[in-house]
Amino acid sequence: MQNLKLSKEEEAKVMADLNKRSDLFTFRFLMIYSVFGIFISFYYDTWLIGFGTAALALGSWFILKALLPSASLHRYVASGFFGVFVGTFIYQMHGLFEMHFFAFIGSAILIVYQNWKYQIPLIGFVVVHHAVFAFMQYTGVPDIYFTQLEYMSLHTFVYHAALALTVVIVCGYWAHHFRKLTMDNAMKEIALNKRISMTQQLNKKLELATQKLKTQNKELEDNKSKLLSLTEKQAAMYEKLRTGGVV
Amino acid sequence: MLRKIAAGVFIASVLGAIGAMFWWTEIQYLLPTPIPEGYREVYINQKVYPGDSTSTELSKPVFYHFFTTNCPCSRFNLTHFNSLRRQYGDSLEFVVVIPAEDDISKARPFFEGETKIIRDVNQEFAVSLGVYSTPQAVIINTNHQLYFRGNYNKARYCTDPLSNFAQMALDSLTSGVAPPEFGPQATIAYGCGIDYTLSM
C-alpha cells in the first residue's frame, strides 16, 4: 500500500470535492467579515469603506467564480480580501489594536483549503499595507515609524511582523500537512475499494461454485435414494427367494 | 482565453478600487499637508488677533480646534478633543473653527454640549494663526500671544500618551511656564489642507 500513488486525475477529484466544501465555508466567513465591516461603520461613519469593501469582496467572489469556474483565482482573491479587511477594520476602528487579530483569523480560515499557497495573498497584502504606511510616514518626517497607523516603535513592529509571519507559516504548514493526510486517506480508500471489489468478485465466484456444488449434491442425493430403493428391492427379493427355497 | 482576459481586467479594476479607497481615506494623509501658496508662518509668542478680537487682555486663554467635517483625519481625534474640553473647559475658552467652505450645522453633532463653533469666513482665523491644515490645535494666552500651534499627537488616532502635544501645552499654560518646544513631530501639520485661495 505504501508504494501506491494517486494519479493526477484522482488527486484533482479529491481536491475538487474538498474545494467545494471549503468554498462554502470561506464564503460564509467573507459574508461575516463584510457584515462586520458594515456594522463597525457606525462607530466613525466609515460607510464608504464598510460597504465598498463588502461589495468588492463578495462581487469579486461571484464574478471570478462565474468567469473561471474551474480555476482557483477566486480563492486567491478571497485570501487577499481577508488581508484587505484587516486594513479596513484597523482604519474603521481608528487603529484599535485588536483589529490586527483578524489577520490571524483569516489565516486560520484558509487552512480549510489544505493549500499553503492560499496564505500568500493574505500575508502579501498585510505586508504591503504596513510597508506603504511606514514608507510614506518616513518620507514625510524621518525618524517617525508607523505612527500614522498607530503608535508603534520599530522594535515593537519587528515583533508584530515576526508574530504575524509565524502564524501564517504555521497555518501554511498545517494546510500542507492536512493535504498530505487527505491524499494518504484517499489513496488508502482507493486501495481498500479495489480490495473490496476483488473480494466481492471472489465471493461471487464462490457463490457460483457453491450453487454448482449444491446442484451436484442434489443429484448425488437423488442417485443415492434411487440406489437405496434398488438395494431395498434387491434385499426383499433375496429374502423372498431365500424363504421360498427353505419352505 | 477571453474569460481569462476579462478576469485579469476585473482583478486589475478591483485592485485599483481598493488602492483608490485606501488612498482617498488614508494614504494621502500620511504625508505632511502641503504648505499653501501665500502661507505666512506665525511664530510662538507672536501677538495674534484672530477674527474681530481687540488688543484688550482676554479674560481666559483660548484654545482653537481647527476641524473639517468631511476630513477623516479630523474625526480621528474627536474623542481626545472632547476630553480636553471637559478637562480644561473651566480655565480656557474652547472654540472649534471650521473652514469657510464648511457648515456649522454639519459640525455640531461631532462636539459635546455647547462647544462654540465658528465658521472661518475668508479663512481669517487660519491665516492669522498660521494654520493650513485640520485637525490642528492653537492656544493663545490672555496677552494675545501664540502659545502653541500644532498636532494633537504624533499618532493619528491620539493613541500615544507620551506625545499628547496639545494636552502638554495646556498643562504648561495652566502651570504658567514658557511655551514648550516639541519639535517637528508636533509642528509639521498632517491632515486635510485648508483652502487658502478663499482668503485672497
Image (cartoon, coloured by chain):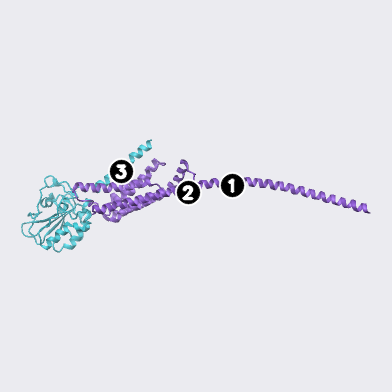
Chain colours: A purple, B cyan
Element at badge 1?
helix
Quarter of the rendering containing residue B61: bottom left
Three-letter amino acid code at the position of disc 1: Gln
> Left of A159 or right of it: where is B177?
left
Name the residue beneath numbered marker 1.
A200
Residue B15 marker: 3
Q: Secondary structure at mark 3?
A: helix
Instruction: Please give left or right for residue A118 compared with residue B160 in the image.
Output: right
Q: Amino acid at mark 3?
A: Leu
Between B189 and A174, the residue placed more toward the observer is: A174
Crowding at label 1, few (<14), some or many (≥20) Cα neighbours within 10 Å? few
Q: Is residue A27 at least partly visible in the picture?
A: no
Question: Can residue A10 be seen at all in this image of the molecule?
Answer: yes
Which residue is tagged 2? A185
Q: Chain of mark 1?
A: A
- Gap in Å between the C-alphas at discs 1 and 3? 56 Å
- Assess whether mark 1 and mark 2 are in contact (beta carbons under 8 angstroms): no
Residue closer to the observer: A92 or A1: A1
Q: Give left or right: position of A117 versus B183.
A: right
Tag 1 or tag 2, which sits nearer the N-term?
2
